Image: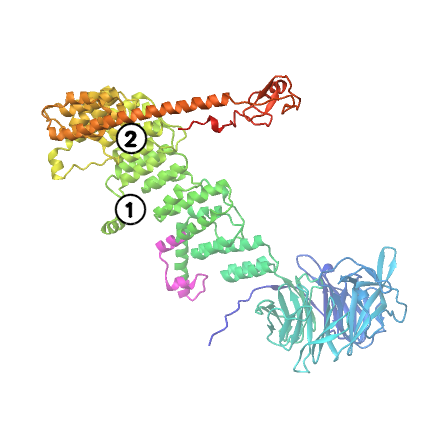
């Protein structure tokens, strides 16, 4: 069977004063008016006693005076603060008294048999007085767009009788009440008297506004807005004060039970009692929330903020409205007995007055902060924060106070070694500053000591100190608590620590981990620059303490507010140089970052910046790990790519090039920097042995930067030539045959000879003679051909292409490029009479004649043909060549004849146009001004329009009368076109 969780009690009310009555007087009713601190006590003997609370530190209750109301008990006391009057029900009549009980009691004899009275309460609060007249219904309480009193009409009762008098009397809508007489509800308005600007209610002058008949005898009644709640023996009813209709809310099973109603003024809800159960309904009679179950049927009900106060048999109990839990119990009278209770008449919810038959006790609500402190002192942190949240929801404490409670709970939990729960509360506090935990991380004094707020809390915890001290003191406290517990004494130490004694290292790890969590969350807040610096710097401290390398490097390489001076020595001593390098880079200290990467490259040339165990695991699965040296060069080059400081770049270029030439080239050719480096100084700084770096840099200057400096072009050509020669020499024929070539790690994808050939062909700015000096004695024949071509040595180029390279297509293309027929004849001579002792290249010669023989002189060809050339090999070619020449001759004659015919056609067309006749007579008119031409000069345009000479001068030669411009839109006639 599941047990109900124990509800922990708290001190909400505390007694502040007490007043003992004489034994001859027994208290029957009670009322309290907080603005004047007056307590009105009604006795069984019919007396009304006035007590006053002195608002000093002692809260003494003093007797003021008393007055006899009637010979019967004073059943109830009602305060009308607006008119400074008391309404007292005694002996079935209503009596009016003044607040100070100095004027005579006024008895209202018009109403007899009154059992209970309830004044009308307005849920929208009290407003200024507004005088209402029954006759004219002037503005007052407006609901639904009409005056409250105007809405009364019909239904038993003659609305508007003032003790049988007229109906044009001033009535204050704040002084309207309902009186229960048997089964009737009589709605009554209190009549006042106008005297200038003052108003004085006249006790004894009432107006009956409406009478409502109920089903049963009325035992209790309350009135909120237009809803009158009636308690009868048969059940609870809801009546409308306007319509006069009553409806059953729910019936009571036991007719002998006494119904009891209470208006909860905080929310203007109504509490309905049945035996020991109460439900809360709204002004429409609908239940809201759960029910309240008391330990017995209460003698009286009061309200205190978010709690309901019940008195029974000499005991007072407080129940939370929302949960229904009993949160406090107070013994009022040791012997028990009936008690009477009243709360603040104005609903402020601070004072509760309880009376036993012979004494009056005043209770003051304990301030919310003190209630919370009480739980915190008991180290009941969940109850403390739950209470704070409940009080905040009820509007009794501010959001700032709620945040303070979370922060206070967090600090107490820190010193109790519950670091995770402590940080959870820190994160819930919106007002707590991250600087408040700085003393836990760095001992005072430090850079941020002045940022730590002082004296902000309730003094329930010691001043913050470094985590090691907190943990050591906490462990000592646990050891003392274990000793005291063995001696039978209670301690405030968590029992879990007794069962599992904490390990210091585990506690320190937990503390640091959770403080890291808090600082990371604090980075998202809107903080001052000083606090941001402290948060990031101390976060790095904590990362270092746990050796969280990845987190350290991530923080250092991102945007941060760390103070390098605070961390530099610390990171150096612990060997976290990578983190320090990233941090210096993020702070703009590139020179420091580069110096650190250089140190790392030197010291970790054969190691890894990873855990050796993890490294071995990765190597086993074949993952290629980057060495520390390579990583250092990569990070340094990344920094240098964005720098424009030439001296700093050249200072670190050497060691980066020693590690990775690609990275060095990337540094020199970076487009990220704002100002490019001086090429002359860069070239002078590059190690001459690192020719590939120099080549790549010159290539970048020439191809990407469009440099037209002949010096750079010549230097680049010479570097490529030297590299090509070295490569050619190292690649011996034997190695080529065996298929094994020396391994070369180059920064270029294309072979050096290919790059040399492309550059020699594409550039016109290098000095070919200097290149020729290097390759003249080498076997780089294609390169020689390119250089000779630049120098205009056509014969040498053809000899190399045809004889050395045997590239007939290239040789013929070069002849075509030269564009002279003698070039082909020269190539033919080379084929027939090669140098270097080679045999005549008859097939190449025949191929040349086959492709280009038609354009050559046959006689010259026959003269150059060698007698050693086989006749059968050359006969077909020579015959085809001669036939082609004859065919070309005939084609030329045909073309000549056609040209003459075309010329003749053109001449005839021009003659025909010139001989065109236009007939003009005396009736002919100008197409522009329409004047008769007669004997006048005229002109005719190509579109056959005729104008007089005057219009021709005005119109111009190119534009006719029709507007056609013959310059842009010429006219063609069939007779002008040439036909074959």
Residue 491 part of the magenta-drawn span: yes
> In what element is the residue under mark 2?
helix
Residue 553 part of the magenta-drawn span: no
**Is 167 on the left-hand or right-hand side of 516?**
right
Decide if residue 292 is in sight here: yes
Q: Which residues are magenta?
A: 484-511
Q: Residue 850: x, y in percent?
A: 20, 30
Q: In the image as oriented, which residue stretches furthest toward the right?
A: 165
Query: For residue 246, what is the image quadrant?
Result: bottom right
Cβ atoms under marks 2 and 1 closer than 8 Å: no
Q: Residue 578: x, y in percent?
A: 33, 41
The relative height of residue 82 versus residue 234 in the rendered view (above or below) is above
Q: Nearer the viewer, residue 382 or 818?
A: 818
Residue annotated with mark 1: 610
The relative height of residue 825 versus residue 350 in the rendered view (above or below) is above
Residue annotated with mark 2: 696
Total labels drawn: 2
Categorize mark 1 by other alpha carbons within 10 Å: few (<14), some (14-19), many (20+).
few
Spatial CA span between label 2 and label 1? 34 Å
Query: Which residue does the image show at 89% across and 71% down from the upper left?
Result: 164
């Amino acid at each position: 069977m599941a047990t109900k969780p124990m509800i922990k009690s708290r001190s909400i009310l505390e007694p502040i004063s007490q007043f003992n009555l004489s034994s001859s007087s027994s208290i029957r009713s009670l009322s309290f008016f907080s603005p004047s601190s007056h307590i009105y006590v009604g006795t069984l003997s019919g007396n009304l006693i006035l007590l006053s609370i002195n608002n000093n530190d002692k809260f003494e209750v003093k007797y003021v005076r008393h007055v006899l109301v009637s010979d019967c008990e004073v059943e109830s006391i009602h305060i009308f603060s607006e008119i400074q009057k008391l309404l007292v029900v005694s002996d079935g009549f209503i009596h009016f008294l003044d607040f100070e009980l100095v004027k005579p009691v006024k008895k209202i004899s018009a109403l007899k048999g009154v059992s209970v009275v309830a004044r009308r309460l307005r849920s929208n609060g009290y407003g200024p007085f507004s005088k209402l007249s029954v006759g004219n219904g002037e503005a007052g309480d407006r609901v639904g767009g009409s005056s409250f009193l105007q809405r009364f009409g019909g239904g038993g009762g003659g609305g508007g009788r003032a003790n049988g008098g007229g109906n044009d009397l001033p009535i204050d809508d704040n002084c309207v009440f309902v009186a229960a007489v048997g089964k009737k509800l009589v709605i009554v308005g209190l009549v006042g008297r106008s005297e200038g600007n003052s108003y004085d209610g006249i006790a004894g002058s009432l107006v009956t506004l409406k009478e409502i008949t109920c089903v049963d005898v009325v035992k209790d009644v309350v009135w909120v807005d237009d809803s009158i709640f009636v308690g009868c023996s048969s059940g609870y009813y809801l009546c409308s004060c306007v319509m006069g209709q009553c409806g059953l809310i729910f019936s009571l099973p036991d007719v002998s039970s006494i119904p009891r109603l209470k208006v909860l003024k905080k929310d203007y809800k109504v509490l309905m009692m049945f035996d020991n159960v109460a439900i809360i309904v709204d002004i429409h009679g609908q239940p809201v929330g759960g029910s309240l179950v008391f330990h017995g049927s209460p003698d009286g009900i009061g309200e205190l903020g978010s709690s309901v106060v019940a008195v029974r048999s000499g005991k007072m109990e407080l129940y939370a409205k929302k949960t229904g839990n009993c949160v406090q119990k107070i013994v009022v009278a040791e012997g028990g007995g009936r008690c009477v209770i009243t709360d603040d008449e104005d609903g402020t919810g601070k004072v509760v007055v309880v009376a036993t038959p012979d004494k009056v006790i005043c209770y003051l609500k304990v301030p919310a902060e003190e209630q919370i402190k009480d739980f915190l002192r008991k180290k009941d942190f969940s109850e403390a924060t739950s209470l704070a949240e409940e009080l905040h929801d009820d509007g009794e404490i501010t959001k700032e106070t709620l945040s303070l409670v979370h922060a206070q709970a967090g600090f107490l939990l820190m010193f109790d070694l519950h670091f995770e729960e402590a940080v959870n509360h820190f994160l819930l506090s919106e007002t707590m500053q991250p600087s408040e935990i700085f003393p836990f991380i760095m001992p005072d004094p430090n850079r941020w000591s002045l940022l730590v707020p002082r004296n902000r809390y309730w003094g329930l915890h010691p001043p913050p100190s470094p985590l090691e001290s907190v943990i050591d003191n906490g462990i000592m406290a646990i050891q003392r608590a274990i000793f005291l517990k063995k001696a039978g004494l209670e301690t405030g130490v968590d029992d879990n620590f007794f069962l599992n004694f904490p390990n210091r290292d585990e506690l320190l790890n937990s503390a640091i981990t959770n403080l890291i969590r808090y600082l990371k969350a604090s980075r998202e807040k809107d903080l001052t620059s000083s606090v941001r610096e402290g948060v990031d710097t101390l976060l790095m401290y904590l990362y270092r303490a746990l050796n969280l390398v990845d987190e350290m490097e991530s923080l250092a390489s991102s945007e941060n507010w760390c103070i390098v001076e605070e961390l530099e020595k610390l990171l150096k001593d612990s060997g976290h140089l990578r983190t320090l390098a990233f941090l210096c880079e993020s702070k703009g200290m590139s020179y420091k970052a580069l110096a650190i990467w250089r140190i790392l490259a030197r010291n970790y040339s054969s190691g890894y910046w990873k855990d050796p165990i993890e490294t071995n695991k990765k190597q086993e699965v074949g993952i290629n790990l980057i060495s520390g040296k390579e990583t250092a060069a990569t990070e340094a080059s990344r920094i240098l790519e964005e720098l424009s400081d030439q001296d700093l770049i050249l200072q670190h270029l050497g060691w980066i090039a020693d590690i990775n030439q690609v990275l060095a080239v990337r540094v020199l050719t970076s487009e990220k920097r704002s100002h490019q480096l001086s090429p002359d100084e860069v070239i002078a700084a590059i190690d001459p042995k690192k020719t590939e770096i120099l080549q790549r840099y010159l290539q970048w200057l020439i191809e990407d930067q469009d440099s037209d400096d002949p010096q750079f072009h010549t230097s680049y050509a010479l570097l490529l030539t030297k590299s090509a020669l070295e490569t050619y020499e190292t690649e011996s024929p034997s190695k080529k045959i065996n298929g094994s070539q020396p391994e070369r790690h180059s920064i270029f994808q294309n072979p050096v000879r290919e790059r040399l050939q492309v550059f020699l062909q594409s550039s016109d700015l290098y000095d070919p003679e200097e290149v020729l000096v290097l390759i003249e004695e080498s076997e780089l024949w294609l390169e020689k051909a390119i250089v000779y071509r630049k120098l205009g040595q056509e014969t040498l180029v053809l000899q190399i292409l045809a004889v050395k390279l045997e590239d007939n297509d290239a040789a013929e293309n070069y002849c075509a490029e030269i564009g002279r027929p003698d070039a082909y004849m020269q190539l033919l001579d080379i084929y027939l009479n090669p140098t270097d002792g080679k045999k005549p290249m008859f097939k190449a010669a025949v191929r040349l004649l086959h492709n280009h023989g038609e354009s050559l002189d046959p006689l010259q060809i026959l003269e150059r043909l060698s007698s050693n050339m086989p006749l059968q090999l050359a006969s077909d070619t020579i015959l085809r060549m001669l036939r082609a020449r004859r065919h070309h001759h005939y084609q030329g004659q045909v073309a000549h004849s056609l040209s003459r015919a075309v010329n003749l056609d053109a001449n005839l067309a021009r003659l025909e146009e010139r001989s065109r006749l236009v007939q003009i007579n005396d009736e002919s008119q100008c197409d522009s001004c329409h004047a008769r031409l007669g004997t006048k000069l005229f002109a005719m345009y190509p579109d056959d329009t005729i104008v007089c000479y005057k219009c021709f001068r005005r119109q111009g030669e190119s534009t006719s009368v029709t507007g056609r411009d013959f310059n842009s839109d010429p006219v063609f006639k069939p007779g002008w076109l040439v036909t074959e």
